[in-house]
Amino acid sequence: MQDEPITYGTQNRIYQPAIAVEVVVTDEKRIELVASIGAPKGERIPPHPLATKRAIHMDQSVASDLLKQLRETFQRMGWPLPT
């Protein structure tokens, strides 16, 4: 995956839905949350014909906060927590 710097002070939303997500351990103190974003129907995104990926690097404190927010969101939405 190619590293791509962001412009600080901006807010970006990827509006295409994620079709898959994975957590990758990058070293003993950091992880990446990787989302595969589906291509619109009939459109191809090189190099993979079906998806492009975006990764967010985080340390333990950020990952813990993400987990807490996901649990709270599941409860608020009435979704069962995965086992």
Image (cartoon, grey):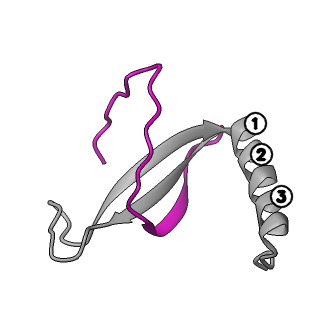
Q: Amino acid at mark 2?
A: Ser
Q: Nearer the viewer, mark 3 or mark 1?
A: 3
Image quadrant in which you'd find residue 3: top left
- The residue shown at (41%, 55%) is 15
Q: Are marks 2 and 3 in contact (CB under 8 Å)?
A: no
Q: Secondary structure at mark 3?
A: helix
Question: Gap between marks 2 and 1, in whole Å?
Answer: 5 Å
**Mark 1, residue position:** 61
First-in-chain label (3 vs 1): 1
Residue sticking out furthest to the top = 9
Q: Nearer the viewer, residue 8 or 31?
A: 8
Q: Nearer the viewer, residue 42 or 58?
A: 42
- The picture places residue 37, in percent across and down from the top left corner, at 37, 63
Question: Gap between marks 3 and 1, in whole Å?
Answer: 17 Å
Q: Amino acid at mark 1?
A: Ser
- The residue shown at (47%, 55%) is 34
**Mark 2, residue position:** 64
**Mark 3, residue position:** 72
- The picture places residue 42, in percent across and down from the top left corner, at 15, 76
Q: Are marks 2 and 1 in contact (CB under 8 Å)?
A: yes
- The picture places residue 73, in percent across and down from the top left corner, at 77, 60
Q: Nearer the viewer, residue 42 or 44?
A: 42
- First to last magenta residue range: 1-29
Question: Gap between marks 2 and 3, in whole Å?
Answer: 12 Å
Picture mark count: 3
Q: Are marks 3 and 1 in contact (CB under 8 Å)?
A: no
- The picture places residue 67, in percent across and down from the top left corner, at 75, 53
Q: Nearer the viewer, residue 15 or 45?
A: 15
- The residue shown at (79%, 80%) is 83
Q: Amino acid at mark 3?
A: Glu
Near mark 3 (Cα within 10 A), the count class, few <14, some 14-19 or many ≥20, is few
Q: Is residue 57 above or below residue 22?
A: above
